[in-house]
Amino acid sequence: MKLKIKSSVSKRFKITANGKILCGAINKRHGLTKKPNKRKKINRGTGVVKKVTADMIKKHLVAGKL
C-alpha cells in the first residue's frame, strides 16, 4: 500500500533545509478593514511553526518531506 501525504498539509506548510516548518500568517483572509494596520503588518509573510505543532504536522507527511 502506498503511503500518501495529507494534501492539505502540503499546501499550507513548507519544510526548510534545516527541518523547520514555515507557514503563512493567520487572520489575513477577511475583515481586514476593522483590524489595525500594526496587526496586519505583523502578519505579513511567513513564520516558523513552534516545535510542538511542528511534530504534529510532520506526522501527516511521508518521511518528513513535502
Image (cartoon, grey):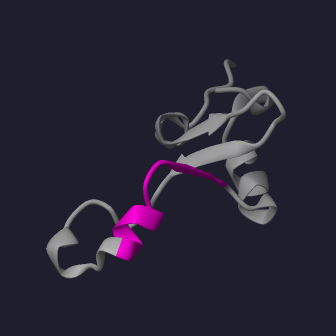
**Residue at the top extreme, as displayed:** 2
The quadrant holding residue 65 is top right
Residue 2: image x %, image y %?
67, 18
- Please give the range of residues in magenta: 38-48
The quadrant holding residue 32 is bottom left
Q: Which residue is drawn at the image coordinates 72% and 32% (left, top)?
A: 16
Total marks drawn? 0
Residue 7: image x %, image y %?
49, 34
Q: Is residue 45 left or right of residue 40?
A: right
Q: Is residue 38 left or right of residue 16?
A: left
Q: Nearer the viewer, residue 61 or 47?
A: 47
Q: Is residue 18 above or below residue 26?
A: above
Q: Which residue is drawn at the image coordinates 77% and 43% (left, top)?
A: 20
Q: Nearer the viewer, residue 14 or 45?
A: 45
Q: Which residue is drawn at the image coordinates 47% and 35% (left, top)?
A: 11
Q: Nearer the viewer, residue 46 or 65?
A: 46
Q: Is residue 41 above or below residue 36?
A: above
Q: Nearer the viewer, residue 45 or 8?
A: 45
Q: Is residue 1 left or right of residue 19?
A: left
Q: Is residue 35 left or right of residue 61?
A: left
**Residue at the right extreme, as displayed:** 18
Q: Which residue is drawn at the image coordinates 18% and 81% (left, top)?
A: 34
Residue 8: image x %, image y %?
47, 41
Q: Is-magenta flag for residue 14?
A: no
Q: Is-magenta flag for residue 41?
A: yes
Quadrant of the snapshot with the C terminus: top right
Q: Is residue 63 above or below residue 55?
A: above
Residue 30: image x %, image y %?
20, 65
Quadrant of the snapshot with the N terminus: top right
